[in-house]
Structure formats: structure tokens, C-alpha cells
Amino acid sequence: MQENHTSLGNKAFGDGSFSLTTVKYRSHIDALKAVEFALHDTGGISLLGGPDGAGKTTILREFALHLANETEVVFVDGSHLKPHQLLAKMLAQLGGDVHAGSDQQMFAEVERIVSERARSRQLPVMIIDNADRLYPSSLAIVNQLAGIEVNARFAIRFILAGHETLPNLVNSDGLDKVAQRNPGSYSLGPLSAKETMIYLHARMQAAGSERADTIFPFDVCDRLREQSGGWPGKLNRFALEAITRSSGFPLSVVDTISAKKVAKAAADLPVLGRKVAASRQPPRLVISRNGKKIGEYVIRDKKVLLGRSDFADVIVNDDFVSKMHAVFLLYSDALVLLDLNSANGTTVNSATVGKTILRSDDVISLGNHRVKVENAPPVSAEMEELMKSPDTLKMKNLIDLRRLRAKRQIKLAGKN
């Protein structure tokens, strides 16, 4: 049965996917250790920092489940919470009277409950995600709670999560009681390239895919890491967008389609594999829009894809450009451009082409964009003849001749 990759993608990376599986990576593991160490320290406060999408919420949820077996846990998202809302959420999870009355009465109820827990040596842990987004008046409540002591011990342990600037906020005048407890601090780092691949595959497999490694091959994983910076939240979003953008095809199928297009278009061209001379500057593409330069690309690989898709090597965001529009093939004696059956075709120097040899100063027109070629390799007479010939048999003979010459050169080199 063929997998529904869009459905699997939504399950693996869409809303609510946090409950699917937890993929641990180096920074994730280190964060858990740092948080646990800080909670068991005398101060009993841990600060967890990182940008949006760093995985803070996932780590907090995992740690909350771990703590729930041994102590009472209060979990609150502090985003734009006013004091009354903050106290109500705390009371609801502590089993207190949510309708205790005014903010002062609600605070007194929270204080009563946590003090009772502390006397029985069951110190509750309050986890506040997005603590730096609390209203200042709500932060003042947190500061007051941090100052509650029973029998010379702090009554509440805290885990506060927010952006990397959270320690600066804690050291401000408004959170003096929190700062006095000398909180431990840990700032999350991104996933490595290998961790990114493991993360994407694990989530797809947990969603029910049996082809995670083909949906997200290594090169796609690497590109998604570049786009996301290695941050899990952003990685989820870009992975889901990539699957959705592929119009129902798995990414591997899109890559295969592209590869087949390239292979079909290049069927009459020799596969030489010869490197460009080191002394020569590599070809360069200068990209402009409406006469204004917007970027450039140096061709160093033997195959470079051009298109509108984010998975192209040279991305041209133009309505007249197909997702996989054309491919550049770099030989030692020519730079060849092949159109990949694009919807609007490819124009070079005002002429529509299917395949052509590019020379320096040639201009490729793509809607409102222009791509100028610089440092194109000098074209050999043999390659020129090969490109011009419409006779498939003759072209095949030329290819065989080239391969035979290459074999002879290898044998001669072996004798020396």
C-alpha cells in the first residue's frame, strides 16, 4: 500500500505532534541533566533558555512526566498571563479553590497549600514555560512565591523557561528573590547534521512511515537543517512545508523525478566525469531581477539544478520558473544547459533552447529574472559537434569514442 505522505507529515510534524515521540539529542540530554541538577541544588531553581523552536517545551513536558512520579508538578504557559490567570492555573493544579476571591486571597491560598506540602517534605515543582512573556505584575507573583520558606527551606522549586535573555531578566530588580536563590542556567543548542537526520526519520517512523529514509534522504535532511538552523520547532515547520510543497509526492520521489528528467535530457550527452582544470576559475552565474543584481552562484559541482523549489541549487522565485526548471552540467570542455521540460521553456540570448552549450556573457531569461554566465570553460570541437548533431547514432558513436580514448589514457598511465 502506498503511503499517504501528506497525512504522515502532518502527524509527524504538524500541530500536536509533540505527543508523538521524543527524539533526544546531545543538547536535549544535557539540558535535562542541568535542570535536574539545579532542582536538587540548595536554591532549587533552574533556568532553561533558547530561541523559539529550540525544543524547550518538549523538554519541559518530558521532565514534568519524570517528576510526576515523585512529587507534585504545576505546569503553566506564562505567555501574557495576568496575575489572576496565573494564580488560577496554579490553584487548579494544586487542588485549591480557584474561586478564592481577590488576587491577594488566591495568593494566600497558594501559599497555604505549598507550605503544607513543604512541611510534609513534598516540595512541589512549578514549571513556567515562556516565563519571560509573563506580565510584570505576574512576574512579581513568581518572585513572591520564590521567597516562601518553611523550616528554613524554600517551599517551591521552579523551572523557568524563556529566551536566552532570561538570566538577564532574573537579575533585574523585580526578581530579587529569584536571583538570591542563585538559579542554575542552561541554554539549548541546535541539532547537528546527524542528529537532524535521526530526528526526521524517527518522527516519520513514529507516525507510521516505513520509508522515512527515502522520504528524507541525507541531502534533503542537510538542506532542511540549513533552513531551520537545526532548531526542532523550525525543523518541524520546514519538513511539513517540504512534504506539502511536493504536491503529494514524497521528497524522494520528487528527487527521483528530477533525476529522471536530468537523465532523460542528458541521454545524448557523454558522461565524462573529468574535472575542470584547477588553474581555471569555475563558472559563475550572476542573477538579476529587473536589471538589479540580487545574487550569484559559483558552479563547482558537475550537476547544478535551477528552479523555483527550495530544493534547487539555484533558486529563482519567479512565476515563469518551474520547480525544477533546468540543469547545468559542467564538463572540462563545456558548460551545458538542459531544460527539464519546464512549463514556460528556457531562453538563452533571446532564443528558446532545449539544450545548449553556454559561453561567457550568455544571458538566460527566466520571467523577470536574468542569469548571466561568467567564466564558462572553453568549448572543444568534439563537444560542439556532439551538441549540434541530431543523429542519435552518430552521437552515440562520439560518446563511445570518448570513452575509448579515456580507457586508453588510463592504460597508458598505468604503464608509466
Image (spheres, rainbow, N blue to C red):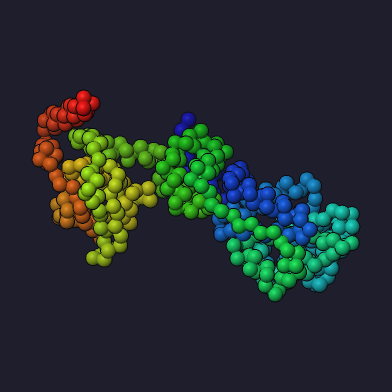
Q: Quadrant of residue 148?
A: bottom right
Residue found 27% across the figure and 54% down from its top: 320
Residue found 44% across the figure and 40% down from its top: 218
State the residue in front, 322 or 217.
Answer: 217
Q: Position of residue 99 (x, y in %)?
A: 81, 65
With 384 as the anchor, is 289 left or right in this view?
A: right
State the residue in front, 150 or 326.
Answer: 150
State the residue in front, 383 or 241.
Answer: 383
Quarter of the picture holding the C terminus: top left
With 319 as the anchor, is 89 left or right in this view?
A: right
Q: Position of residue 5 (x, y in %)?
A: 47, 40
With 179 as the anchor, is 330 left or right in this view?
A: left
Residue found 47% across the figure and 36% down from its top: 213
With 120 as the anchor, is 131 left or right in this view?
A: left
State the residue in front, 416 or 35.
Answer: 416
- How many marks overall? 0
Q: Residue furthest bottom?
A: 173
Q: Residue furthest front?
A: 416
Q: Position of residue 264 (x, y in %)?
A: 25, 36
Report if residue 202 is visible in the image: yes
Q: Quadrant of residue 338?
A: top left
Residue found 21% across the figure and 24% down from its top: 415
Q: Position of residue 93 (x, y in %)?
A: 77, 56
Report if residue 59 is visible in the image: no
